[in-house]
Amino acid sequence: MLTFFLLLISNVFMTFAWYGHLKFKQSPLWIVVLASWGLAFFEYCLQVPANRYGSYRFATVELKVIQEALSLVVFAVFSFLYLKETLRWNHAVSFVFLLGAVFFAFRK
């Protein structure tokens, strides 16, 4: 669970680093780049230990699939709540296909 929790929180930081500035389009680009790098630092401080700890239990492919699935879930929540964007039916279908990828990645 530690790996999952660290990956989840790191994805929250990275999502804000990559997309949080879209609500501040009037800010100069150099400021949002520096702010994004600052957030990305904390993402790395969580992502690297998550992968290190997770490597004792999961294959690297499984770690990557977990990270990508969490990334998309975090992004969907972020875009809906923070950016106030609507999620459409085709987004839901794509998430179902990604859950299928997670299923097959962990299938023995």
Image (cartoon, rainbow, N blue to C red):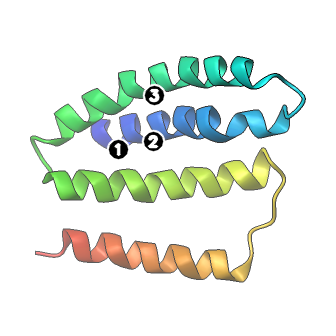
Q: Which residue is mark 2?
A: 8
Q: Which residue is mark 1?
A: 4
SS under mark 2: helix
CB atoms of marks 2 and 3 within 8 Å: no
CB atoms of marks 2 and 1 within 8 Å: yes
| Mark 3 vs mark 1, CA separation in Å | 14 Å
Could you say which quadrant of the image residue 7 lies in? top left
Relative to 42, 45 lies left or right: left
Q: Which residue is mark 3?
A: 43
Type of amino acid under label 1: Phe
- Which residue corresponds to the image point at 74% horizontal and 33% vertical from the top-left? 21
Q: Image height check: is 69 above or below 46?
A: below
Q: Which badge, 3 or 1, comes first in the chain's sequence?
A: 1
Q: Image height check: is 75 above or below 28?
A: below
Relative to 108, 36 lies left or right: right
Type of amino acid under label 2: Leu
Please tell me the numbered disc located at residue 29: none
In the rendered image, which quarter contains the C terminus?
A: bottom left
**Horizontal and vertical percent position of residue 93:** 58, 82
In the rendered image, which quarter contains the N terminus?
A: top left
**Horizontal and vertical percent position of residue 85:** 81, 59
| Furthest residue toward right | 26
- Which residue corresponds to the image point at 56% horizontal and 17% vertical from the top-left? 38
Q: Which badge, 2 or 3, comes first in the chain's sequence?
A: 2
| Mark 2 vs mark 1, CA separation in Å | 6 Å
**Horizontal and vertical percent position of residue 14:** 53, 36
SS under mark 3: helix
| Mark 2 vs mark 3, CA separation in Å | 10 Å
Pointer 2 local density, CA inside 10 Å: few below 14, some 14–19, many at least 20:
many
